[in-house]
């Protein structure tokens, strides 16, 4: 300590610029003072910053298409962007079934279209857009985009299973912004205004528009699925089997979209997990004025475009109906009340399918076989609604 104090006392009284010098304690372990930057150093620094800026711009430009591709892998082609692109690149269907994921898993488009054609006596095409966890806030903005495209579907069936109408469904609210990013048209001020209005977090929505890398970083989970698939393929060819470390399902393989076409029998884990999802979604059930407003707005948009609209309750597993009778009844009463206020018919198939585990992905979703069995019942109800 005495040495350091002595060094401080011996410091010159003034520096070359006339000011008191900056005393550096412990200078023996600190890097030396940097001298003034040379012209070459300045040029190198500016060049590095420019390259970094260009890199950031490039990352933003490519993050959206890469994110879309990874999302398609993760969701087996049932992500919002893929379903929307399918809709806008195909002829407008006669009947559109719209809502959360059961709107897609419970309907086999080919079988349903064939049954409708046979019943009505002319070609009728049905199409589905079912999005995991989405609620009326997202569907309101989606209906805006649907009605921007002509012609319009003759009939739109809006599915609801209960949690998707609750303001307190956390999983439903979390899904809104990602869905809005995937259907965005930033050249349309009307859409931008509506999206900001319905978004549970408008600031984060705007950040995702400005910096797509933040909107699509979650799609990187698909890389794990791709790596697992590659590892399984190589292992099978090299050692003739899949190592135990690669036998567990990937995050992509746990989704109903993946299981819909690949799984023949519902597993106990699928069943109990879906019951938990329903229970959590129905906690503090509340169809808030905001949710009701979005429902009323999207129905008004559809009707203004000349489309008929009905509510559709898709099948629920008999054990779910038995486990949550109060919650199921509460959601039915709220849907019936909204339907009465908006002059809508309700098609109720909540108890239309048997217990058979070969027909279900889980307690909330039919599998491919179940959708085929359900198709004739659904076709009859939609044919009636279309002709009424």
Image (cartoon, rainbow, N blue to C red):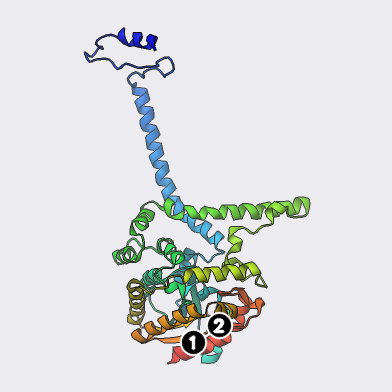
Please tell me which residue is depicted at 51% across the width and 55% down the height of the picture.
219
Q: Quadrant of the N terminus?
A: top left
Tag 2 or tag 1, which sits nearer the N-term?
A: 2
Task: Tell me residue 9's x, y (percent).
Answer: 30, 9
Q: Which residue is mark 1?
A: 382
In the rendered image of this protein, does residue 232 appear above or below residue 271?
Answer: above
Task: Tell me residue 340's x, y (percent).
Answer: 37, 87
Element class at badge 2 = helix
Q: Is residue 265 in sight in this rendering? A: yes
Q: Are marks 1 and 2 in contact (CB under 8 Å)?
A: yes
Q: How many marks?
A: 2
Task: Tell me residue 49's x, y (percent).
Answer: 38, 35
Q: Which residue is mark 2?
A: 112
Please tell me which residue is depicted at 55% across the width and 63% down the height of the picture.
75
In the rendered image of this protein, does residue 104 appear above or below residue 381?
Answer: above
For disc 1, the neighbor class at 10 Å (few under 14, some 14 to 19, many from 20) is many
Q: Is residue 66 in sight in this rendering? A: no
In the rendered image of this protein, does residue 214 appear above or below residue 197?
Answer: above
How far, Cα to Cα, is label 1 from label 2?
A: 10 Å
Compared across the picture, whether 115 is left or right of 49 comes to: right
Please tell me which residue is depicted at 36% across the width and 18% down the height of the picture.
33
User: Which sits in the foreground, 321 or 120?
Assistant: 321
User: Which sits in the foreground, 62 or 215?
Assistant: 215
For disc 2, the neighbor class at 10 Å (few under 14, some 14 to 19, many from 20) is many
Task: Tell me residue 342's x, y (percent).
Answer: 34, 84
């Amino acid at each position: 300590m005495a040495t350091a104090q002595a060094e401080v006392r011996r410091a010159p009284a003034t520096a070359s610029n006339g000011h008191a010098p900056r005393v550096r304690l412990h200078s023996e372990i600190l890097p030396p003072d940097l001298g003034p930057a040379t012209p070459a150093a300045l040029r190198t620094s500016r060049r590095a910053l420019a390259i970094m800026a260009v890199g950031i711009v490039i990352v933003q430009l490519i993050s959206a298409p890469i994110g879309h591709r990874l999302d398609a892998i993760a969701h087996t082609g049932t992500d919002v962007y893929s379903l929307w692109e399918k809709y806008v690149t195909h002829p407008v269907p006669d009947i559109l079934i719209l809502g959360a994921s059961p709107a897609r898993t419970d309907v086999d488009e080919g079988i349903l279209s064939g049954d409708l054609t046979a019943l009505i006596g002319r070609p009728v095409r049905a199409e589905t857009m079912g999005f995991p966890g989405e609620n009326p806030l997202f569907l309101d903005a989606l209906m805006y985009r649907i009605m921007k495209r002509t012609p319009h579907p003759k009939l739109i069936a809006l599915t609801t299973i209960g949690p998707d109408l609750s303001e307190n469904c956390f999983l439903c609210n979390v899904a809104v912004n990602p869905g809005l990013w995937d259907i965005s048209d930033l050249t349309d001020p009307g859409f931008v205004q509506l999206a900001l209005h319905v978004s549970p977090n408008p600031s984060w929505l705007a950040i995702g528009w400005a910096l797509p890398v933040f909107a699509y970083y979650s799609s990187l989970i698909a890389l794990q699925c791709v790596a697992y698939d590659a590892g399984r393929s190589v292992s099978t060819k090299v050692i003739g089997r899949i190592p135990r470390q690669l036998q567990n399902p990937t995050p992509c393989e746990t989704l109903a979209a993946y299981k819909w076409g690949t799984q023949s029998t519902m597993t106990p884990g699928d069943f109990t997990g879906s019951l938990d999802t329903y229970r959590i979604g129905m906690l503090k059930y509340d169809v808030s004025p905001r949710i009701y407003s979005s429902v009323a707005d999207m129905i008004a948009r559809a009707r203004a475009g000349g489309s008929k609209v009905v509510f559709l309750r898709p099948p629920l597993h008999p054990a779910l109906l038995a486990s949550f009778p109060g919650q199921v009844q509460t959601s039915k009463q709220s849907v019936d009340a909204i339907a009465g206020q908006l002059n809508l018919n309700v098609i109720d198939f909540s108890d239309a399918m048997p217990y058979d585990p070969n027909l279900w992905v889980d307690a909330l979703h039919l599998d491919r076989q179940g959708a085929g069995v359900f198709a004739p019942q659904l076709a009859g109800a939609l044919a009636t609604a279309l002709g009424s």
